[in-house]
Amino acid sequence: MSDAVEKALNDEPLLGFSFHTANQVGIVKTLGTEILEILDSSVSEGTDGSVRVERFSKLYGLFWLWVLGAFEVLRTMVSAKICFSDHAHRQLSRYKDKLVKLRIPFAKQQLAGRNEAIRGEASISGFDGKKKDFHFIVGEEEYWVRVLIKEFNALVEGIKREDILMNYYDYIDRKNG
């Protein structure tokens, strides 16, 4: 392998899995950065404890898209178990399972695993002016936007080259072959 390819794979290990997945992860991370920047600039707390949120529809819409994108990227990676080390696959799978509980209400307007319409699960449950953040509650779980974005970034950035055991396209060809 050329030095340039070696450097690219060391810098961006997910390229060893799939160029498209690496690109999609980059898009999800960029979207997450935009959401965090908007939270920083548009959520504030008044001296009376009230919370002011500017660009609410934009924030909600971008986060909705972030959840759908992050989940789909994770679903692709988790579906190709033999392409990842056991440790990496477990981490990816755990986070996908966490995210699905929020993704289902966003995508299907139902609760995960149940043919039951949502009530408020796709609605923001609260804002925190000090944290400059908002959250959702699904069942008994709280999902803070900043936490989810930072966890996703840490997860994908934590994947090392040695965690990629097989290219996705080889996996699909082998599976279909």
Image (cartoon, helix red, strand yellow):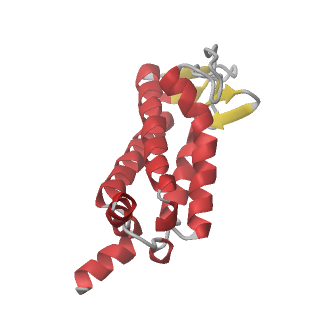
Which of the 4 image quarters holds residue 135? Answer: top right
**174 left or right of 36 in image:** left
Which residue is the extreme one toward the right?
140
Please report the residue visible at 68 percent of the width from the left and 27 percent of the height from the top.
Answer: 137
Coordinates of residue 130 in the picture (x, y in percent): 65, 35
- In the displayed structure, would residue 5 be above or below residue 177? below
Report whether residue 41 is seen.
no
Coordinates of residue 106 in the picture (x, y in percent): 52, 26
**139 left or right of 103 in image:** right
Please report the residue visible at 57 percent of the width from the left and 62 percent of the height from the top.
Answer: 89
Which of the 4 image quarters holds residue 126? Answer: top right
Coordinates of residue 4 in the picture (x, y in percent): 24, 80
- In the displayed structure, would residue 87 be above or below residue 78? below
Please report the residue visible at 48 percent of the width from the left and 47 percent of the height from the top.
Answer: 75
Task: Give 67 or 21, whichever is nearer the viewer.
Answer: 21
- In the displayed structure, would residue 83 be above or below residue 112? below
Coordinates of residue 63 in the picture (x, y in percent): 47, 33
Task: Give 50 or 28, whichever is nearer the viewer.
Answer: 28
Total number of numbered labels?
A: 0
